[in-house]
Amino acid sequence: MKCRRYYSGFLSFVQSGNLALCLLWSIIHLIVGIWYFALGIAGALESCLISIGLLKRYKALDIGKVRYLAIVIDSEEARQTSKVIELLRWLAAIGVKNACLYDPDGILKKFKEAFMTRLGDAQLSEEAAVNDPLLDQKYMALEFASLSDGKEAAARAANFLFVKYYLGGADKKPIFTESLMAEALKAVGCKVTEPDLLLVYGPARCHLGFPAWRLRYTEIVHMGPLKSMKYGSLIKVIRKFTMVRQNYDLSSARKDPEDYWKSIMKGEPMPKAIKDLFHEDLASQSTSSQASKMDHFIKDFDFKPSVIIYHSHIRTPRRVAKPKSAPKAKNLLLGQV
C-alpha cells in the first residue's frame, strides 16, 4: 500500500513535469507564431504601399544591374499560365530585358508559343540575339528551360571532354575545373549565361534542378507560392539586389588594387609581397598595363573563384585563396575573412 502511494506520487510528478514542458512549448510556439504573423502583415502592407507608389524609394530602380533574371517555378504551379503571363508583364514593366523561365518538367516550354503571343513585346532569346545584338535591345528576351536541358548539356559536355582529353591522345590528363566545363559547354553549343538573380516560386526552397554551372555568381530568393505573388514583393526583392555591393566585380580591383584589397580584407593593408606584383607608381602606368598586372595577380592567387558570393546579401567574401605561385607570398597568412 505504501509503495503504491509512492508510485502514484512519482507518476503525478512526472505528469506535472510533462504538462509544464508542454505549456512552455505552447507559449514559445504562440510567441513565434504571433511574431511571424506580424511580419507577414507588415510585409503585405509594405507590398501594397509599393504597388500603389506611396514609397518613393522604390520608384527608381537601377535595373541595369539585373542583366539576366531567372524565374524558377514548381511544375505544378507552372500550369497557372495566367499567373506566369502576369509575372512576365510585371518584369517587362520594371524594365527587365533578359529572363529565363524554368520548371523541372518542361511545362512552360509547352506553352511557349502562347506566352509569346500574349506578351507581344517579347522574343525568344535566340531571335533577340540576332535582331537586337546591341545592349539597348527593344524587346524582352525570354529563354525557356527544363531539367532535361541541364542533363543533356552535362552529358554532351562530358562527352566532349572525354573525346578531347582521353581519346585524343593527350599526354597529360587535366584536372577538370569549372573553366574547362564552361569551355566544353560553349563548344557543344549550350547556353551558359549566368543569371544575376534567381527567383523561386513554389513550396520548395531550392533551385529545383536549375543547371548548377549557371549559378556561380547568382543570388537565390524564395518568393513563395505563385498564386500569392505580389508586384510590391517583386519590386522590393529587385531593389534590394541592386542596392547590395557586388564584391566579385573585378573592375574596381583593376582601377585601384590597394583599395580593393582593403575593402575585401576589412581594412587590412595589402602585403608588400603582393604589392610587388604591381609597379610602384600605378598612377603613371597605362590602363592596359594595370589590367595586365591585375590579371596576373588574379591568375597567380586563384582570386576569381575565391570571391564568389552565392547570396549577395553577404557583403564580404567568405575566404581568400592561398597563393599558388609567387614565392614571395608563401609565408603570408591571408586568413579567413
Image (cartoon, rainbow, N blue to C red):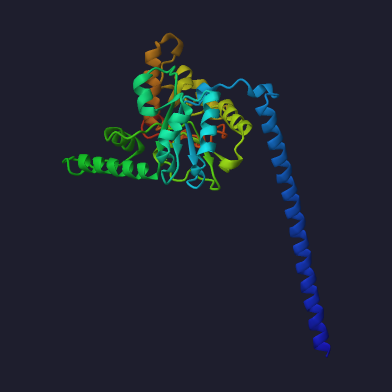
| Residue 222 place in picture, x, y as percent | 56, 41
Which of the 4 image quadrants contains residue 132?
top left
Q: Is residue 227 left or right of residue 333?
A: right
281 shown above or below 228? above
| Residue 50 place in picture, x, y as percent | 66, 28
Query: Which residue is at 41% across, 41% downward?
Result: 212
27 shown above or below 84? below
Q: Which of 222 and 292 lies nearest the eye of the viewer?
A: 222
Residue 93 appears in view:
yes
Q: For the image shown, how many numbered marks are present on the structure?
A: 0
| Residue 202 place in picture, x, y as percent | 54, 45
| Residue 316 place in picture, x, y as percent | 55, 32
Most distant residue in the top direction = 284
The C terminus: image quadrant: top right
Q: Which of 19 and 255 lies nearest the eye of the viewer?
A: 19
The N terminus: image quadrant: bottom right
Query: Which residue is at 25% across, 41% downward?
Result: 161
Query: Which residue is at 73% across, 54% downward?
Result: 29
Q: Is residue 196 left or right of residue 326?
A: right
Which of the 4 image quadrants contains residue 104?
top left
Q: Which of 293 and 144 lies nearest the eye of the viewer?
A: 144
Most distant residue in the left direction = 169
Residue 332 appears in view:
no
